[in-house]
Amino acid sequence: MSDSNPAPSGVVGTLLSLHNGLFTLVQKLTAGWFIPTAARAIFAGVLLMYFWVSAKTKLGDGIFGWLFPSDGAYVQMFPRAMEAASYDSSQLSIFHWLVAVAGTWAEFILPLLIVIGLFTRLAALGMIGFVIVQSLTDIVGHHADASTIGAWFDKASDALIMDQRAFWIFILLVLVLRGAGPLSVDRFTIERPQHG
């Protein structure tokens, strides 16, 4: 019985065989470590300082700035509520305060966890939620225009929300699905041999 899809022969077959053999070898050499390690390195290089600088703008004054966010934090997170309160954050509810504190802490803690590779999958999942909420706040709360929102399958690749944040979420999904890789606190704590 003959094969219904015979392998190409001649020069094309030889080139295809070399191609497949080379990339199968590359895949074996990088299996399990390269993709999650690269995802964390790219996250650190592109997004760590972005989120930390953003979080710093939300800190209030003095030693208790971690517990009492700046008015700017409320404007960033709740633009419509702040406008309705004449930009006086003292008129907002405890809910607004809790979200502002939790959001500020999340912007510091979750990126750090990803970079050092501790609770990486959970931190990446949290960051995906954070990016989605950030994007919805930009669209609904700050009334982002069509060019800022962008669209997929168009000729432009530089929209801040649809294009850029899709790549952010993809990198984070890699970490959710693959974990942190071997150069991580997760690996040293999870795979440490148990004695006793």
Image (tube, helix red, strand yellow):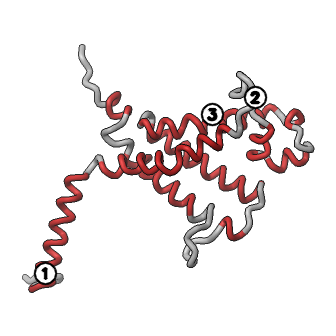
Residue 80: give x, y in percent of width and height: 84, 50
Label 2, on which residue? 61
Q: CA distance from mark 1 to mark 3?
A: 56 Å
Secondary structure beneath dot 3 equals: helix
Q: Residue at x 85, y 37 (%)?
A: 89
Residue 192: give x, y in percent of width and height: 28, 26
Secondary structure beneath dot 2 equals: loop
Image quadrant of residue 13? bottom left
Label 3, on which residue? 105
Give the side of residue 189 with respect to residue 141, left or right: left
Callout 2 amino acid: Asp
Q: CA distance from mark 3 to mark 2?
A: 15 Å
Marks 2 and 1, the one that precedes in the sequence: 1
Label 1, on which residue? 13
Q: Residue furthest left?
A: 1
- Quarter of the picture containing the C terminus is top left
Examine the rendered structure and indicate whether residue 157 appears above or below residue 78: below
Callout 3 amino acid: Trp
Q: How many marks?
A: 3
- Quarter of the picture containing the N terminus is bottom left
Q: Nearer the observer, disc 1 or disc 3?
A: 3
Callout 1 amino acid: Gly
Q: Residue at x 34, y 52 (%)?
A: 35
Give the side of residue 194 with respect to residue 129, left or right: left
Q: Residue at x 17, y 59 (%)?
A: 25
Secondary structure beneath dot 1 equals: helix
Query: Label 1: how many residues lie within 10 Å, few (<14), some (14-19) or many (20+)?
Result: few
Q: Nearer the observer, disc 3 or disc 2?
A: 2
Residue 184: give x, y in percent of width and height: 36, 36
Give the side of residue 123 with respect to residue 72, left or right: left
